[in-house]
Image: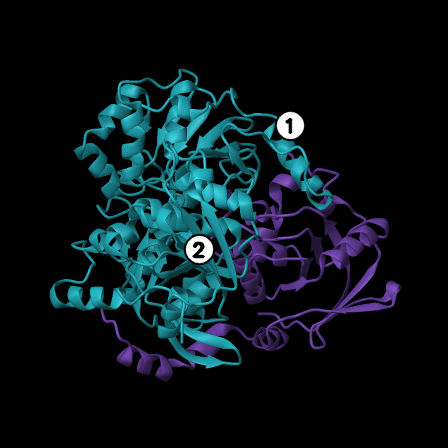
Amino acid sequence: MEKFQTLHTTGRPLPLENIDTDQIIPARFLKATTREGFGTNLFCDWRYHADGAPKADFVLNDPRYQGQILVAGKNFGCGSSREHAAWALYDAGFRTVISSYFADIFRGNALNTGLLPLQVSDEVLARLLAAIEANPQLELVVDLPSQTLAVPAWSETFSFAIDGYKKECLINGYDDIDFLVNQKSAIEAFEKKRAWTW
Amino acid sequence: MASTLFDKIWDAHVVRSIEGLDVVYIDRHLIHEVTSPQAFDEIAARNLPLFRPSQILATADHNVPTLHQDQPIRELLSRLQVEKLTENCQKYGIELYGLGHPRQGIVHVIGPELGLTQPGLTMVCGDSHTSTHGAFGAVAFGIGTSQVAQVMASQCLLLSRPKRMRISVEGELRPGVTAKDLILYVISQLGTGGATGHFVEYAGSTVRSLSMEGRMTICNMSIEMGARGGLIAPDATTFAYVEGRPFAPKGQAWNDAVAYWQTLYSDDDAMFETEYTYQAAAITPMITYGTNPGMGIPLTGHVPSEVPASEAESFDKSLKYMGFERGESLLGKQIDYVFIGSCTNSRIEDLRAVAAYVQGKQKAQHVEAIIVPGSKQVEQQAIAEGIDKIFAAAGFELREPGCSACLAMNEDKIPAGAYCVATSNRNFEGRQGPGSRTLLASPLVAAITAVQGRIVDITQYLN
């Protein structure tokens, strides 16, 4: 997993609520057996016409927006557990998604992919969306060690929550497999003493 | 100290706790062809052995065809993905119920019918509807592919404990109202994010009175309101269902198991962070009108006219996609397809409910009605009971098992613009194929819709 520390970039607004993982990456693209290449089909049915031509009014096709942060409506990533949704966002160049609420499995998948799910209040989200739409160049600074999102143009900084262990993993590029494999003796001891054997 | 059912099971599986996170032991790991290949690659890349391959069970379900399963899969990428699963299972010594195997089927249908799903266990699968297994009083939840690899490597996951929610439903369901209506009603009340961060226990006299199939339907859709999972305390109904199945404990082990299972309930004074109570009498046959499972209304109801300003853009986009207007009734709307299947409603009880209604009737001429059983066993049972002949006579097509038009990864797709009443779990945009329009409902509503060819008040049509 790539290390994540600080990100200076702009945002791309997608102000819809309840964006489900079927929209992020439709099921018909889940037939690949590797992790790469999903970015081409990110938001496929919102992004392209049936003939493959880009839809001019969709944010990913708007040349004014180039940043590495997706700023999306509340309850982002609901629905299917497919980690491919996080891979598709990452593959398309995103490193952070800002929303006011994330679905649990998506949040976990994003963290395991090196994509930071950054939760802000409904009010801050609404301000960010309006400001980015008015000024696509609005600079955003995500600083993971200090758990802050700064908007220099506003002279404002917002703090965000993240589990301490997951923060360390992201900063150092570690993942849970390394940790869990090192628990082998504790796991074997647990297996010997558990109450049920059927 | 008083404890919830969820906490009793969770606590019994904590190997150790570190900085607020628990190393949770996983008893059963179910895998399928779509969310496992990258996990196997991860294990291979790190040169790790599988920690407990005997606790993993594999099936092919998500993108298998539902016709001609005795022949090679024609669609290249689907075939490659299924072949990859077969290779990986052979390489690592994992039991696989692939195409042609008498135990093949949808992962969440075969676990219970084989007796693999049992009270008190922890179960995971790279599929959000793993919550289905909670119907047996198991802690079961969907995981991402990185976590699939973690369980392969260690039989454990590193997790933070979710919050607990209890949803109680009391009283007797009205005629024509089923478990599917109950859960669509609850999700319509709470919304798609209403249970995010929580594990839900379903309780109350209505839930207790349901069959295991009905309980599975409810727990299956827990994820649709954002819950990590749902579960129901095991009872005599549960034990009777599990007993005698291939993987169920036998002899003294059965007695020991039941004695343990009888301790699995929430103590009277256990605390839940969130509680809701509903009355069964308030629930009527339901249908969805929009593009998430929270957008449900009574069949005889109206699409909402007003929504909060913050939701307006998403709401109107959804209605535009579906071709519906604010405030309108769905009664009389012509339907093009009926899909009876998916891990929500493809069990023998669902097929029996459909057959009981359509016996001696004909589907409307313009409707294509497809029934996809949840497993080879369900298919065989339907044939043994003569249900297949009832379907054929009524113009319904009984296919071979798989996930099918629930997520349309195989050839079973609903065309753009067409309306489909489906017993599945999701009505997201394009879920059943690009441009398809899905209305979620119970098997009974689906059966009546297929016969009438349009949305009707089913209470006027009950046998």
**Horizontal side, residue B57 vs residue B288: left or right:** left
Q: Give me the chain letter of mark 2.
A: B
Task: Tell me where residue B321 sits by quadrant.
Answer: top right
**Please, what is the three-letter code of the amino acid marked with disc 2?**
Thr
Residue bearing mark 2: B35
Q: Colour of chain A?
A: purple
Answer with left or right where residue A138 lies relative to residue B345: right
State the residue at coordinates (26%, 38%). Answer: B70
* C-alpha span from label 2 to label 1: 37 Å
Q: Where residue A9 sits in the image (x, y, percent)?
A: 77, 62
Please state the horizontal and vertical placement of residue B184, each as a whole percent of the image. 47, 41
Measuring from the top left, give residue B355's x and y in whole percent. Answer: 28, 28
Mark 1 neighbour class, 10 Å CA radius: few under 14, some 14 to 19, many 20 or more = some
Q: Is residue A135 above or below residue B257?
A: above
Residue drawn at 58 percent across, 73 percent down: A166
Q: Front-most of B26 and B268?
A: B268
Q: Nearer the viewer, residue B26 or B91?
A: B26
Compared with residue A107, is residue B411 higher up or lower down, i.e. above or below? above
Q: The C terminus of chain A lies in which quarter of the figure? A: bottom left
Report the front residue among B356 and A198: B356
In the image, residue A183 sits, relative to residue B46, either above or below, namely below
Q: Residue at x 63, y 76 (%)?
A: A171
Task: Specify the quadrant that holds the N terminus of chain A.
Answer: bottom right
Rendered colour, chain B? cyan
Chain of the residue displaying label 1: B
Q: Position of residue A91 (x, y in %)?
A: 61, 57
- Secondary element at image label 2: loop
Q: Secondary structure at mark 1?
A: loop
Residue with the mark numbered 1: B325
Identify the residue at image location x=42%, y=59%: B141
| Front label number (2 vs 1) | 1
